[in-house]
Image: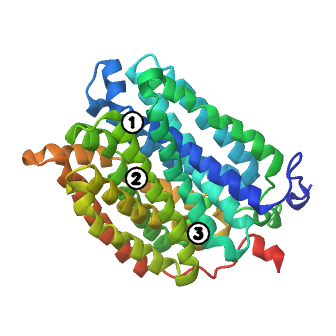
C-alpha cells in the first residue's frame, strides 16, 4: 500500500489549522512539564535531604538526553510518519512526568528526568516538521512564532501551577503534569499525516548519516546556532525564579508567581511578533534584531531595584529571547534536507541542548566564584550569547522563500 493512500486516521479533517493547534499544544504541554522542575528545585532537594546543586542535575540530565529523543523519534517519524510518532511521543513524556511525581528516591528521580528528556527531545522536531510541511508557505513566519510561543506558554502554565505548590506539593505538580496524555485523543481525531511525507511514499529512505555527511557545514552551523540559542533561553530562565527572585531578592511566593506571568507574557508577545515579522523582513534580520534587543533590557532584568523595574526588564528580555526563538521552527525546517526533515531540526536543536545542558551548573559556579553574585552570572551569559546569536544569524542564508510541504500540493 502506497504511503500516499494511507488514511490520516478516524475523523481526521485534513485542515492545517488542526495540525498547527496540535503541534502548538504538544510543545506547550511538553514545556509545561519541563518547567515544573525549575519551580521545585529547592523543595525536591529538601524532600530528598540534599542540596539544590544535586537537584539541578535533574535539569542537566533532561537537557542532555533530549538529543537521544530527537534522533530516535525523528527517525521513527521519517520512516513511519509524523502523526503516529507524535502520539507515541506525547504519551511517553506524560507517563514519565507522572512517574517523576512518584519517585521514591533522588536516584530514581534523576533517572526518570533523564528518560523524560528523551521523550521531550522528540516532540519539537516531529511537531515542527508536521506543521511546516502541512501549511501554505505564506503562513510559515506566523506559524513559526505560534509554535514557539508554546514554550513560554508552558512556562506560564507552570508558573500558575506553582501558585498551588504550597497545597499540592512538588509531587502533586508532577502528577498534574501527566494531563498532556489527553492531547493524543485530539491528534488521533483531527490531525492528518504530513503531505510532504506522503508525497515521498514508500521510496527508499537514505540513512541519516549519509545525508548529514553531504551537509557537514550546514549541520555544524545549525548546532552552533542552536547551542547559542539554548544558552540564551535557559540562561535567562532556569535559575531566575528560585535562585534570583526568591533567593537573592527574597520576594514572596505570590510576587514570584506574578513576575513569572509577566515574564512569559513578554515571551509570548515576542514569539508572535518576531515570527510574523520574519515573514516580512526575512529570517536573518528578524533573528539578529531580536537577539540584540536583549542587551538594553539586562540592566533592568538583572540589576533593577524593586519589583517594577525587574518586571519591565523581564518582559522586554523575554520578548527578545522568545522573539528570536519565534524564527527558529521555520528557519530550521527551511534549511533542513527534505529527506530527514523530522530528524534534522530536532537533532540539531537537541545537540544544542546537550552542549547547553551545563548552563544551570555553570551559572551556579559563576555565582560563587570569587564572591560574585547571581546578577553577574545571569547577565554575563546573556550578553555573550545574544551577541553570538546576532553574528551567526547574519552569517546564515535567507530561507523564507524555500518551498516545501503543503505548497507542493497547493500549486
Q: Which residue is mark 1?
A: 39
Place of residue 304 in the rendered image (x, y in percent of width and height, measured from the top left): 21, 56
Sequence-wise, which precedes: disc 2 or disc 3? Answer: 2
Place of residue 190 in the rendered image (x, y in percent of width and height, measured from the top left): 81, 50
Image height of 301 relative to 240, above or below? below
Which part of the image, by quadrant, shows the N terminus?
A: bottom right
Query: How many marks are shown on the rendered structure?
Result: 3
Mark 2–mark 1 contact, CB under 8 Å? no
| Residue ID at (52%, 83%) | 281
Sequence-wise, which precedes: disc 3 or disc 1? Answer: 1
Q: Which residue is mark 2?
A: 263
Q: Quadrant of residue 388?
A: bottom left
Q: Quadrant of residue 339?
A: bottom right
Place of residue 216 in the rendered image (x, y in percent of width and height, measured from the top left): 49, 70
| Residue ID at (50%, 23%) | 172
Mark 3–mark 1 contact, CB under 8 Å? no
Asked if residue 273 lies left or right of residue 294, the reply is right
Q: Which residue is mark 3?
A: 330
Q: Residue furthest left?
A: 370
Pick the front one: 384 or 179? 179
Amino acid at each position: 500500500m502506497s504511503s500516499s493512500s494511507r488514511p490520516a486516521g478516524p475523523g481526521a479533517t485534513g485542515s492545517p489549522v488542526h495540525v498547527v493547534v496540535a503541534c502548538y499544544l504538544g510543545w506547550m504541554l511538553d514545556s509545561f512539564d519541563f518547567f515544573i522542575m525549575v519551580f521545585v528545585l529547592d523543595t525536591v532537594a529538601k524532600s530528598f535531604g540534599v542540596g539544590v546543586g544535586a537537584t539541578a542535575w535533574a535539569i542537566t540530565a533532561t537537557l542532555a538526553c533530549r538529543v537521544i529523543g530527537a534522533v530516535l523519534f525523528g527517525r521513527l517519524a521519517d520512516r513511519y510518519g509524523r502523526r503516529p510518532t507524535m502520539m507515541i511521543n506525547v504519551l511517553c513524556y506524560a507517563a514519565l512526568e507522572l512517574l517523576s511525581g512518584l519517585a521514591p528516591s533522588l536516584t530514581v528521580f534523576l533517572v526518570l528526568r533523564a528518560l523524560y528528556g528523551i521523550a521531550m527531545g522528540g516532540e519539537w522536531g516531529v511537531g515542527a516538521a508536521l506543521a511546516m510541511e502541512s501549511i501554505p508557505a505564506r503562513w510559515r513566519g506566523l506559524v513559526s512564532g505560534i509554535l514557539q510561543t508554546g514554550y513560554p506558554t508552558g512556562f506560564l502554565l507552570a508558573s500558575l501551577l506553582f501558585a498551588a505548590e504550597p497545597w499540592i506539593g512538588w509531587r502533586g505538580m508532577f502528577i498534574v503534569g501527566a494531563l498532556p496524555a489527553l492531547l493524543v485523543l485530539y491528534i488521533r481525531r483531527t490531525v492528518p499525516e504530513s503531505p510532504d511525507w506522503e508525497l515521498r511514499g514508500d521510496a527508499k529512505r537514505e540513512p541519516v548519516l549519509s545525508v548529514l555527511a553531504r551537509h557537514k557545514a550546514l549541520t555544524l552551523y545549525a548546532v552552533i546556532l542552536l547551542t547559542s540559542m539554548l544558552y540564551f533561553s535557559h540562561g535567562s530562565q532556569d535559575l531566575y525564579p528560585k535562585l534570583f527572585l526568591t533567593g537573592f531578592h527574597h520576594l514572596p511566593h505570590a510576587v514570584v508567581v506574578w513576575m513569572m506571568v509577566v515574564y512569559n507574557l513578554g515571551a509570548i508577545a515576542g514569539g508572535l511578533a518576531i515570527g510574523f515579522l520574519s515573514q516580512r523582513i526575512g529570517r536573518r534580520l528578524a533573528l539578529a534584531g531580536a537577539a540584540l534587543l536583549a542587551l538594553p533590557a539586562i540592566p533592568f532584568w538583572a540589576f533593577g531595584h524593586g519589583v517594577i523595574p525587574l518586571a519591565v526588564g523581564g518582559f522586554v528580555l523575554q520578548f527578545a529571547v522568545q522573539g528570536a526563538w519565534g524564527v527558529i521552527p521555520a528557519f530550521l525546517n527551511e534549511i533542513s534536507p527534505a529527506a530527514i526533515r523530522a530528524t534534522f531540526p530536532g537533532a540539531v536543536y537537541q545537540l544544542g541542548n546537550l552542549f547547553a545542558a551545563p548552563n544551570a551548573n555553570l551559572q551556579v559556579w559563576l555565582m560563587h566564584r570569587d564572591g560574585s553574585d547571581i546578577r553577574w552570572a545571569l547577565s554575563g551569559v546573556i550578553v555573550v550569547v545574544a551577541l553570538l546569536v546576532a553574528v551567526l544569524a547574519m552569517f546564515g542564508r535567507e530561507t523564507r522563500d524555500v518551498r516545501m510541504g503543503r505548497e507542493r500540493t497547493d500549486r
